[in-house]
Amino acid sequence: MSSDPKIEGYKFKPGYSGMAADTASDQTMFKGVHWGKAMMWIFLLSDTFIFSCFLISYMKGRGSTPEEWPNPSEVFALNAFGVPVPLLLIAIMTFVLITSSGTMALAVKYGYERNRKMCGWLILATALGGLTFVGMQVFEWSKLIHEGVRPWENPFGAAQFGSFFFMITGFHGTHVSIGVIFLFIYAYKTFAGHYDEGKRGWFTTMKGDYVEIEILGLYWHFVDLVWVFIFAFFYLW
Amino acid sequence: MDEIKKEQTTTHKIGIYLWIWGLLFVLSFFSYMVDWYQFQGLLRWSLILIFMFLKAGLIMAFFMHLFWERYALVNVLLWPMTAIACFVGLMVAEGKYTLFSRLFYFFVEGGQ
């Protein structure tokens, strides 16, 4: 259900003429787009800037230190059957997060098809994937803390390594944890049929609709997107 | 329920999501292989960046539906990224200068 009133005579035009009409339009810019979805995109844009600032400061910190930077493929190696495998846990975490992103995309699809059960189970699967990811991150943090990595020092090399590691992965892990909480709430709301009946939410007068699953999905895919960049710049570089 | 329907409610075939899912798995596997085979130097950095941008693009375009979104939204989201690119450029220059000053004043001049 669209939140803004249908405007008489308004017809969506695709392409650049549609973009001109959108940006020059009266009353609202993205006519026909749920306000929650537009605002989620704006929020994600601001979040992009926050994560960019973290990664850029990491780039600057790593690039400007004369000390040797710890080799991530050794620091994050894990012993499997007595052999150290580089980045093993990080690779598994990456695959888990991508899997949960895939189930979320399918949940959005089934939501729009008003397939309540499939949508609910897929959201639940996404939540479990996110929970697995956070659990592995807890393991990774405690392992590094046991090895003596602190925000101000570490036994492997440049002292800045620890502060960037805890800051960046911690902020991302917080995003995942918040996402997991919301995924469980939305799984409940889906199974309870709130989106089929148009039941109002707890803190809003907005009627429930499956577009909320898409909004939640945008957030979850963004968390996966940020991990792509962290994986590339922090773990592989 | 109201009669008003969003124009976005048309869904896509499940195949497209499964394809993108599979591609993301393959690309992640490739970027892990970059570390596994310990590629070094320019080859390593370019491979990491290529796989990263491909994955990010696939997630944004298909999982986040940007490929099907109206151009106004796509432009509102993507143009601010140029500011980030400028910031990266500035900080590369700044980082090089900081490294130079540290090496010069701590090791070259301080040693005399």
Image (tube, helix red, strand yellow):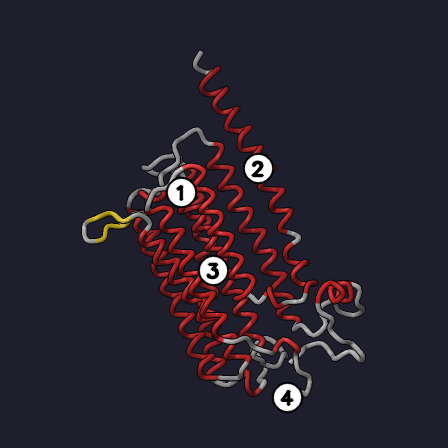
- Element type where label 2 sits in the image: helix
Q: Chain of mark 1?
A: A
Q: Are discs 1 and 4 both within one chain?
A: no
Q: Residue at x 45, y 70 (%)?
A: B18
Residue B3 rendering spot, x and y as whole percentages: 68, 87
Share a chain, discs 3 and 1?
yes
Which of label 2 and label 1 is nearer to you? 2
Q: Amino acid at mark 4?
A: Met
Image quadrant in which you'd find residue A153: top left
Residue placed under numbered mark 3 in the picture? A224
Q: Which residue is mark 2?
A: B91
* Disc ID at residue B1: 4
For disc 4, the neighbor class at 10 Å (few under 14, some 14 to 19, many from 20) is few
Rendered-image quadrant of the C terminus of chain A: top left
Do the residues marked 2 and 3 share a common chain?
Answer: no
Report, in whole angstroms, how far the alpha carbon at label 1 lies from the one at label 4: 53 Å
Same-subunit check for callouts 2 and 1: no
For badge 1, the amino acid type reads Gly
| Image x and y of residue A111, in percent | 52, 79
On the image, numbered disc 1 is attached to which residue? A162
Tell me the SS state at disc 3. helix
Q: Are marks 4 and 2 in contact (CB under 8 Å)?
A: no
Secondary structure beneath label 4: loop
Q: Are marks 4 and 3 on the same chain?
A: no
Q: Residue furthest left?
A: A82
**Nearer mark to the viewer, of 4 and 3:** 3
Classify residue B33 as left or right of residue A61.
left
Name which of mark 4 and mark 2 comes first in the sequence: 4
Residue A30: x %, y % from top left? 71, 68
